[in-house]
Image (cartoon, rainbow, N blue to C red):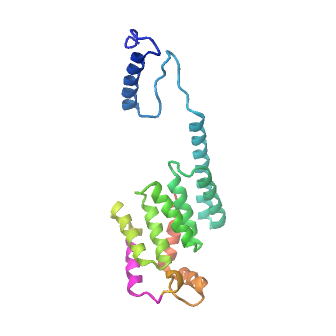
Amino acid sequence: RGYFSSFTPGTPEYEQRYEKVLAKYKQRFGDTAHPAKSKGKSVDASPATEAENENSNKADEYKTKGNELLKAGEHEQALAQYTKAIEICQTGESSHIYYSNRAAVYLILGKNEEAANDCSASIALKPDYVKGHTRLASAYLNMGRKKEAAECAKSALEIDPQNATAKSLLQSAGEAASSSPAAGAGGLPSMPGGLGGMMSQMMQDPNMMEQMNAMREQME
């Protein structure tokens, strides 16, 4: 109070002193709030901030519902819940999880391009999110893009050197590269039955099934 007593509100001297107080306040408490200039005046959260918090909470509810549906094997319904979460909160504190969780469902459904896109969005929001990298590696591996899959697995291991999923994917990428069949259009391995045949083979692969089951159990 005495710090401002010799200055008249609205004058350059008053504003300069207020800015010094504000700077110290931010340094101590962060940049999320600021002291009011008028004595006894409180600063309420802005309508925009309140709306963002409300959207974030609602998005988390959609995510939780999606996790429950995914564990129950209701893939399309889970996908819809994660999509709702993303639609109302695209760049929130947990948005990288929404994208990664939806990517996991796309992987289970064999929609690897969509999975890769969501993983990329997840990584863009939080570069050190390991599941974004491992799921992107899975998508690339499913598409026959072994080099990219290995790079993503290595990125995951740089973040978490003991990550078992990343180690398994890196090994799978190496094995796939050494025993790869001739690639068809778009870099996908040629196999009888086209995409349907590839999905059938994936479903018969114990390692792939283990990864899919693990994804269901590891949702956040």
Determine if residue 86 is in view.
yes
- 202 horizontally vs 156: left or right: right
User: Residue at horizontal 48%, vertical 19%?
Assistant: 37
Magenta residue check for 169 = yes
Q: How many numbered marks appear?
A: 0
Is residue 64 positioned above or below 154 on the image?
above
Is residue 214 positioned above or below 50 on the image?
below
Rendered location of residue 16, percent (x, y): 39, 21
Residue 159: image quadrant is bottom left
Rendered location of residue 116, percent (x, y): 51, 68
User: Residue at horizontal 47%, vertical 74%?
Assistant: 140
Is residue 53 positioned above or below 82 on the image?
above
Magenta residue check for 216 = no
Instruction: Quadrant for the N terminus, please.
Output: top left
The majority secondary structure of the magenta stretch comes to helix
Furthest residue in direction top, as rendered: 6
Pick whichever, 194 or 8, lies toward us.
Answer: 8
User: Residue at horizontal 44%, vertical 67%?
Assistant: 134
Rendered location of residue 125, percent (x, y): 47, 54
Pick whichever, 17 or 157, lies toward us.
Answer: 17
Where are the magenta residues, as a range?
166-182
